[in-house]
Image (cartoon, helix red, strand yellow):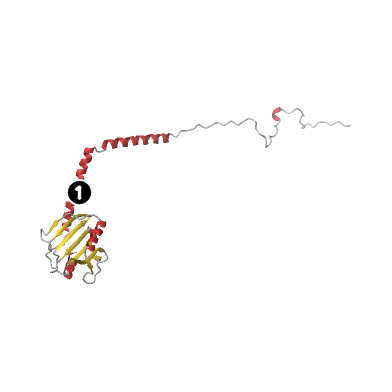
Amino acid sequence: MSSHEPDPDDADTGPLHVDDVQAPPVAADRRFDAPLSVNPRPVRRNNRSVALIAVATVAVVGLGVLAWTFWPSPEESSAGDDNAATSATETQQQAEARLMRLLPRGYAPGACESVVPARGALAQLSCGKNDDVGGPLTATYTLAKDRAAVKDLFDDIVSTSSVVDCPGNIQSPGPWRRNATPEQTAGTLVCGFQQSKPTVGWSTDAELLISEVQSGPQGPNMVQLYTWWASHS
């Protein structure tokens, strides 16, 4: 029996070092019995919201101080009412002056005078004879406060007149237009009789003006009065 001689390249067999020993793999379903520790994050307070609340509070207090400072006293309120009454008087005077400038030509100085305005009017003038051919014997010119008042005042003329078509078979009441702007309605026109007196009434929307002119039983007749209106409106 032949003995086996160790090969010089074979390494010696001996105990393994502890560092060379690998730990067994951990099973995938391994559970930890010890609780996990969590490091809480510090909570940051919203300093911006606090600042906004503070600013809003200061603003409210400031407004209160200003309101108290500038709030009118009872004496100042009374003075304000007096000023308002003065302004209303001035407004009526200005309205009368403006209405005088809107009158048709043909009136002599002093032919028209202001009267107490009708309801819804700023100013009203009562006029005597117009000196132009076919001119009315009497007339009333009214400056209205607004468009609603224009309609109401014009409707009063219609309701107190025996309405007829205007000369030339023109619709009455109906819209009227200026020759320079035939595509634009200038206002509303009505022809009629009041106590046998030929009467022509019309509104001029742009100026909030209502005009009512009359002749007498002896003339001018309706055709002459309408012709005067056509050249003076």
Q: Position of residue 190 (x, y in %)?
A: 23, 65
Q: Quadrant of the C terminus?
A: bottom left
**Picture residue at 21% right of the left edge, 45% below the top:** 84
Q: Position of residue 144 (x, y in %)?
A: 22, 56
- Callout 1: helix, strand or loop? helix
Which residue is nearer to you in this view: 212 or 69? 212
Q: Is residue 96 above or below residue 40?
A: below
Q: Is residue 25 above or below residue 130?
A: above
**Picture residue at 21% right of the left edge, 60% below the top:** 210
Which image quarter: residue 228? bottom left
Residue that label 1 marks:
88
Res. 180 in view: no
Q: Position of residue 38 (x, y in %)?
A: 57, 31
Which image quarter: residue 207? bottom left
Q: Position of residue 220 (x, y in %)?
A: 14, 69
Tell me if 18 is positioned left or right of 175 in this view: right
**Picture residue at 23% right of the left edge, 65% below the top:** 189
Tell me if 168 is positioned left or right of 131 in this view: right
Which residue is nearer to you in this view: 52 or 145? 145
Judged from this view, the residue extending furthest toward the right is: 1
Q: Quadrant of the N terminus?
A: top right
Tell me if 220 is positioned left or right of 65 in this view: left
Which image quarter: residue 124? bottom left
Q: Amino acid at mark 1?
A: Ala
Judged from this view, the residue extending furthest toward the front is: 195
Judged from this view, the residue extending furthest toward the left is: 109
**Picture residue at 19% right of the left edge, 58% below the top:** 142
Q: State how many labels appear.
A: 1
Res. 84 in view: yes
Q: Is residue 63 above or below residue 187?
A: above
